[in-house]
Every structure is written in C-alpha cells, then in structure tokens.
Amino acid sequence: MVLIASHLLPRWLEVLLTEKFYNACIIHEEAKKNEKNVYCLDCCISLCPHCLSPHRTHRLLQIRRYVYHDVIRLDDAAKLIDCAFVQSYTTNSAKVVFLHERPQTRNFRGSGNFCSTCDRSLQDPYLFCSLSCKIDHLIRTEVEISKYLFDCKSLSLPEPGLEDCSITADCVLEPTGSSQTSSGSGGCGGVDCRTFACTATTEVVRKKRTSLSVYGSACRPVCSPVPEISASLMNRRKGTPQRAPLY
C-alpha cells in the first residue's frame, strides 16, 4: 500500500488523495444520484450533484469510477499535476488516469515494465500506475515536489450527459467493442441473435409444431441461413393429405 507523507503536500492534494468518493451524501440522503463524485479544490471537500450550487464558481474536479476505483480525466489531472509517465487509459475517446494504487492478487514480479512504487505491471514507457504512486515516488526521491504541481486558476465540470460508462486500457485491456463474438452470435457481427430468435419463432411454432425440426430449437439464431423450401413447409396449413400420384 502506498503511504504518502501528507505534510509535504498542499491541502487540496492531501485531501484529494485521502477522500472517499462515491459514498452517499449525508445532506441529500433521500435524493437520487446522491453519490459524492465531485471534488472542490477551493473548499477541499467532496460533493454530490445536489451540493454544487454554492460551488459553481470554484474549481471543481469530477471523479469517475471504474471497477470500484477512482479515475480522473487526464486533461483535468494534467492541469494540476505533472502526469508524465503515469499510465493512461481510454474511456469514450477520453484518456483517464487512476487516482490510487489498485490492490494486486499476486506479488510475483517477472520480467517487464513495472510501477516504480507498487510493482504493478505496466506498458512501456510508463513508470507509475496511478497519480498517488507517482506522488509517493516524488516525495521519496525529490527534495521539493512543488515544481510538479501546477497552479490551476480554473477547473470546471464537463457538459451534462458526457458521463463515462466504460473504460479500456491502452494496449492492456481488451477494447469494449472487441471483434470477438459470443458463441451464440451466429456470425452476426457480435450481436447475440438468440434473443431475437426467441421472439421471431414464437408465431411459427404456434402455426406448426414441425418448425422445430427446421430450426432445431425454438431459440436457434435466426441469422443462420434457411433454405427457401423451409418457408413453404412452415407456412403449410393442415388439410387434406397430399398423396403421391398413381402410375
């Protein structure tokens, strides 16, 4: 776990690295969307969306979330801290960085590139997996870290409706829109056709039970090609049996 000497940091950064985000706001406990996901650099407190009105003219930093870990847009973080060599990730075409070190299930260190603070595996040429790891490294190796901190006069929240919903790592994690398809996609460009098949074949099964012999099951992907002759078999109504002609 990264331990940071907080007495060497400015107040806004000390609180940012120790604050617990995405907890429910006590003031707006009964309101919807009351998670504290905004940080006010001027007041050094975390805010929920309902607390923003008195802080609109302050410097506000939005904290995003991925797998229960806090991330910040790289553009915002770069206005406050030197983010060189901190591994960035891409979400909705925007780069983000992790705020804290993430727990690891393994302590094994093989060959490759690793975080200089917590030994997490990284891609070249990165040296740190998170902002806290870099700051901890600077505190241990630099006499003065103020040169790595920037005086940001203005910092505002993004436009409403641009909230990130997924995240992928540059060259590390599989992209959200992976070209691999599920086993039930039936070659339909990554879309699982079984959901559509269950609805599309319902009417056919009601008309004629023998449609199951054509599809194999009521929920088989409808994207699979079906011979033209099968359509006539499914639409044929019960009636006078058709006998073979006599010769």
Image (cartoon, helix red, strand yellow):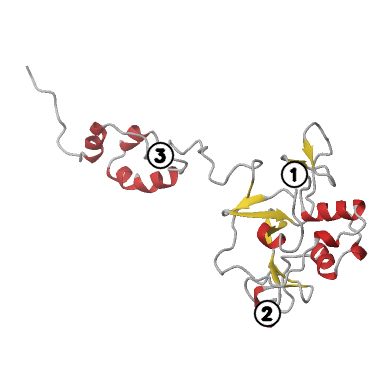
Residue pointed to by mark 3:
221
Q: CA distance from mark 1 to mark 2?
A: 35 Å
Helix, strand or loop at label 3? It is loop
Vertical placement of 177 versus 55: above or below?
Answer: above
Residue annotated with mark 2: 57
> Residue 220 lies in what quarter of the image?
top left
Q: Residue furthest left?
A: 247
Distance from disc 1 to disc 3, alpha carbons, whole Å, reads 45 Å
At horizontal 40% and vertical 47% (from top left) the residue drawn is 196
Q: How many marks?
A: 3
Amino acid, disc 3? Pro
Q: Looking at the picture, how far across and down is residue 109, in whole percent?
A: 83, 35
Q: Name the amino acid, label 1.
A: Tyr
Residue 4 in the figure: left or right of residue 169? right
Q: Which comes before the other along the chain, label 3 or label 2?
A: 2
Left or right relative to 158: residue 38: right
Q: Residue at x 87, y 64 (%)?
A: 9
Residue in the image at 90% along x and 54% along y? 142
Q: Earlier in the sequence, mark 1 or mark 2?
A: 2
Mark 3 and mark 2: Cα distance apart in space: 55 Å
Residue 167 visible in the snapshot = no
Residue 2's spot in the image, x, y percent? 86, 52
Q: Quadrant of residue 175?
A: top right
